[in-house]
Image (cartoon, rainbow, N blue to C red):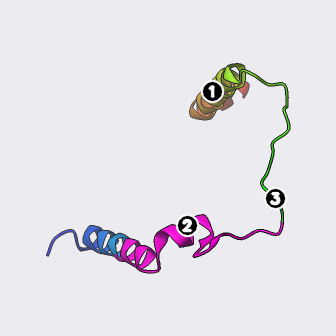
């Protein structure tokens, strides 16, 4: 058989999903029991942080990520320039 490693990875993934849903995946994933969620405290009410629009944070984060990736990609060239 060819691709036995790939087949074994798929087999493990399928077995993991079967096992996950065999133990009632919905209950296991969300923490809900048969009588609803358990918690000694009431529901969480978030405090208003006055940040209405987070687009600026997303743009700054993506630009810094891109700049960092470019810096890492060009590190060998920069190292030669520094020497």
Helix, strand or loop at mark 1: helix
Under circle 2, the secondary element is helix
Instruction: Choose the circle earlier in sequence order: 2 or 1.
Output: 2
- Residue placed under numbered mark 3 in the picture: 42
Q: Distance between the Cα atoms at labels 2 and 1?
A: 30 Å
How far apart in space, not on screen, are marks 2 and 3 (Cα)?
A: 20 Å
The residue that appears at 73% across and 26% down in the rendered structure is 82
Q: Residue 9, which numbered label?
A: none
Q: Nearer the viewer, mark 2 or mark 3?
A: 3
Residue 27's quadrant in the figure?
bottom right
Residue 47 horizontal/vertical position (percent): 85, 38
Left or right of residue 47: residue 31? left
> Is residue 80 placed above or below 25 in the rendered structure?
above
Label 3 element class: loop
Asked if residue 60 is among those painted magenta in the image, a careful observer would answer no
Query: Label 2: which residue?
Result: 29
Which of pointers 3 and 1 lies earlier in the amino acid sequence? Answer: 3
């Amino acid at each position: 058989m060819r691709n036995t490693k790939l087949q074994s990875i798929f087999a493990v993934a399928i077995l993991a999903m079967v096992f996950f849903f065999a133990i009632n995946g919905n209950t296991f994933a969300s923490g809900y029991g048969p009588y609803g969620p358990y918690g000694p405290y009431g529901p969480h009410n978030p405090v208003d942080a006055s940040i209405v629009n987070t687009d600026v944070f997303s743009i700054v984060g993506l630009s810094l990520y891109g700049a960092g990736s470019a810096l890492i990609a060009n590190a060998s060239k920069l190292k030669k320039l520094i020497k």
